[in-house]
Amino acid sequence: MISWIIVIVFILVIIALSKLGHFRKKTFIFIVILLVLFFYSTLLIINSKNKLDFIGLNNYFYNLIDHGYSRNENKIVSDLGWELEPQSIYYVLQDLKKYKKPIYITENGLADNSDSRRSWFIRETLTNVHRAIHEGVDVRGYLYWSLLDNFEWEKGFWPRFGLIEVDYKTQERKIRPSAYDYSKIIKDSAIMRPAKKSRRQKKLIRV
């Protein structure tokens, strides 16, 4: 009840600011929708606190909000144009920590037909997951999306998320190099990262 009162107060404040000319109409509508969705999702998790066994997190990309939506620099992007910022998962995990539930990262990956960014993305993502775990976040598992190239509901077959490449005409499977890198991380329970000073130097992180 209190959370909904806060939502209403926020909306009233935004309406007042909008009338004073501080917000454009589209920005005003976007902020209202964002606030309602935020508080609704928060209430949903709070009310389900004693009914859920764990929290499942699907994480692919992030968006910067700076006087608008999606003002990303897009330094490194996937084939779908999503900016790849592996550190973002750390902040999401930290935010979920307050619910005191085990967390499973049920989906995390990228469309990368050339397989040139996947190993880096997995390595940096797991490094940030490891960081969150060491700071007390109860992460129990990580599932990369996806094992095989798959059909994406909105985009069809062209985005390539798989650790294993699929030839849709012949159904032939081919293991991508990133799959071997991911396998090594799992087998060694460690992440090898390039050091900042030199690309030749490596830094070992036990996970």
Image (cartoon, rainbow, N blue to C red):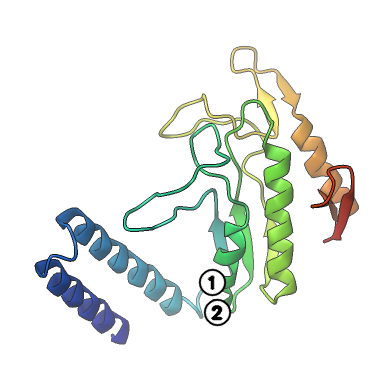
Image marks 2 and 1: residues in contact by CB distance under 8 Å:
yes
Residue 163 vs 134, above or below: the answer is: above
Identify the residue at horizontal 23%, vertical 57% (top origin): 27
Q: Quadrant of residue 130?
A: bottom right
Q: Give whichever of 88, 201 is nearer the camera.
A: 201
User: Is residue 59 visible in the rendered structure shown here?
Assistant: yes
Q: Around disc 2, counting alpha carbons within 10 Å, would you say few (fewer than 14), some (14 to 19), or many (20 or more)?
A: few
Identify the residue at horizontal 86%, vertical 44% (top origin): 184
* Image position of 99 (left or right of 28): right
Point out the image quarter for the N terminus: bottom left
Question: In the structure shown, which secondary structural element does the residue marked by tag 1 occupy?
Answer: helix
Q: Which amino acid, mark 2?
A: Lys
Percent position of residue 94, x then y = 59, 71
Question: In the structure shown, which secondary structural element does the residue marked by tag 2 occupy?
Answer: helix
For residue 95, the mark is 1
- How far apart in space, not on screen, are marks 2 and 1 (Cα)? 7 Å
Percent position of residue 166, x then y = 65, 23
Furthest residue to the front? 197
For residue 98, the mark is 2
